[in-house]
Image (cartoon, rainbow, N blue to C red):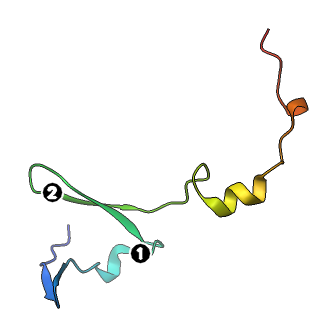
Amino acid sequence: MTVVKKQRIGQESVLPVPENSNSPFEQYEVTAGRDGAIVFLPKKLNPFTDEQVIKKRKGALTDHDSFPTS
């Protein structure tokens, strides 16, 4: 396990990402737990809320693309 120390840069506290993390992601969502844990999860594209994906797929499905349920 790699240990990092919180650093102060300007008005912000920063946790550096170790070089050996090999993470391909550039953005992370951060959550602070009640026990003091700080969790970084990769920010991934949500196809249900991303406007570019919605615009690209608009009209891609028709009523004939679904299966009858009864």
On screen, residue 53 versus residue 17, left or right, reads: right
- Report, in whole angstroms, how far the alpha carbon at label 1 lies from the one at label 2: 22 Å
Image quarter in which the C terminus is found:
top right
Residue 15, compared with residue 66, is above or below; it is below
As helix, strand or loop, the secondary structure at mark 2 comes to loop
Badge 2 crowding class, 10 Å Cα cut-off, few under 14, some 14 to 19, many 20 or more, is few
As helix, strand or loop, the secondary structure at mark 1 comes to loop
Residue at screen point 83% across, 17% down: 68
Q: Position of residue 22 (x, y in %)?
A: 41, 75
Residue farthest right in this picture: 64
Residue 40, compared with residue 26, is above or below; it is above
Q: Which residue is mark 2?
A: 37
Image quarter in which the N terminus is found:
bottom left
Q: Amino acid at mark 1?
A: Asn
Q: Position of residue 7 (x, y in %)?
A: 14, 84
Q: Which residue is mark 1?
A: 22
